[in-house]
Amino acid sequence: MTTITDPPKEQFRLSMLLNDTRYRSLTFQFIALLLLIAAFAYLGSNLITNLRAAGLNISYGFLGEPAGYDINQRPIEYTSQSTHLRASIVGIINTLIVAFLACVTATIFGVIAGVLRLSKNWIVRKLMAIYVEAFRNVPVLIWILIIFFIMTAALPSARVYLGEDPERDLFLGLFAFTNRGIVMPLPVFQPLGWAVLGVFIASVFGVIAYRRYATKLLYDTGKLLPMGWPSLAILILPTIIAFYLLGQPITLDRPDPLANRFNLQGGVTILGSLIALWFALAIYTGAFIAENVRAGIQAISKGQTEAAASLGMRPGRIMNLVILPQALRVIIPPLISNYLNITKNSSLAIAVGYMDVTGTLGGITLNQTGRAIETVLLLMLFYLLISLGISAVMNVYNKSIRLKER
């Protein structure tokens, strides 16, 4: 009588690292990792040796020294006697401001242009095609310079608001458009003003929750709730009610042409360099996003549109509720790359004098201290962290809209 038993397990041998396909790839990867570590160790050792021979060393003590230079756009308190670290923080904030504004604006431009590129109206379709082809085929630096030069040449000097032109008045009594930039009111928050801001932020989340509920109700029961006016009411009414109930704790510091005969006083000035950089990045990247949106929409079967139309849905509803939610799965991955490009292209700000982190830490600070290695390493770390952060956030959103199989 014979019995069936499991075959004896093969003992591990060193030759299996190369001959066995189960281990061969791991062996090659480990060898490549060792070679990479050895190469970086050699370069690092060579760098330290050369620096020691030149009497230099890597030190970040210069960050605590006075910067000695001014920054035109200061989102936080800063003077020329502040440290290089403070100047770098101001540059980082300026970079984040222009990157955030450009990402939001480019998304709006791209979605609108991408949808209109598929319009049945021949003129609208061709105009959007011209926009896409014109802006994405010209370097973004050219557009930054063009917009900046148009602003400085077309807009008047601030003197026209100081009595030089008696017929010139502030736009709506609040805004002054000058060749230096736009002067606009600055909100001044009293202690309870932050509570009003908190109500507004809560209202934003309320709008998101309502729209999700309305969409879920539509998918579950077919009942269609209005989206427009309820969302607007949830966003605005609670904030207005809180504003008046708390005694109007938010005021406006308005530009005052009469306070100074040489310059406008009050409010906040948005420099022309920031506006030029913002809109150039937004319009340029918006052209690429428009192509992504168009490709995502065309990736959805026409049967989806026909089926929704047969149910009596209007074209706008079909696009918002049927087509775009499915197209997002195609749009989001390349959209992440466009956001990363905006953040990195913001380093071109130095061309128009906007002091971002490249202009402060990688520009004036580097020239004054001579610490090229330290400043470049800090710049690399900053852009790496920002890029990884954007990728992480967008990848979380990308996972949330993926098809979830059972």
Image (cartoon, rainbow, N blue to C red):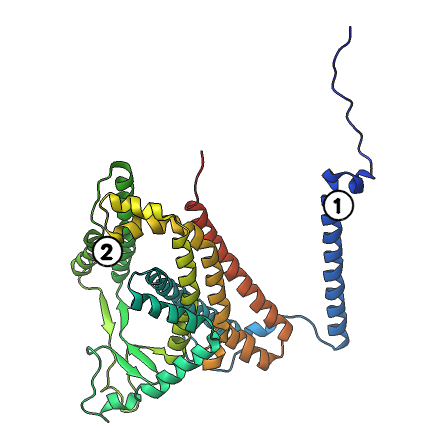
Q: Is residue 71 visible?
A: no
Q: Would residue 94 be found to the left or right of residue 38 on screen?
A: left
Q: Quadrant of the C terminus?
A: top left
Q: Which residue is mark 2?
A: 235
155 over 389 or under it: above or below: below
Give x and y (percent) for residue 16. 80, 38
Disc sitting over residue 5 in the figure: none
Q: Quadrant of residue 162?
A: bottom left
Q: How many marks?
A: 2
Give x and y (percent) for residue 195. 26, 57
- Which residue is pictured at 31% across the width and 89% down the height? 157
Give x and y (percent) for residue 28. 74, 48
Near-viewer residue (226 or 170): 226
What's under tag 2, amino acid-wise?
Answer: Leu
Alpha carbon distance from label 1 to label 2? 59 Å
176 over 57 or under it: above or below: below
Label 2, residues with CA under 10 Å away: few <14, some 14-19, many ≥20? many
Give x and y (percent) for residue 333. 47, 54
Local secondary structure at mark 1:
helix
Near-viewer residue (164 or 107): 107
Outermost residue toward the top? 1
- Which residue is pictured at 56% across the width and 69% down the height? 379
Q: Which residue is mark 1?
A: 27
- Which residue is pictured at 34% across the width and 68% down the height? 126
What's under tag 1, amino acid-wise?
Answer: Thr
Near-viewer residue (228 or 135): 135
- Which residue is pictured at 39% across the width and 58% down the height? 294
106 over 141 or under it: above or below: above
Q: Quadrant of the N terminus?
A: top right
Local secondary structure at mark 2:
helix
Q: Is residue 135 visible?
A: yes
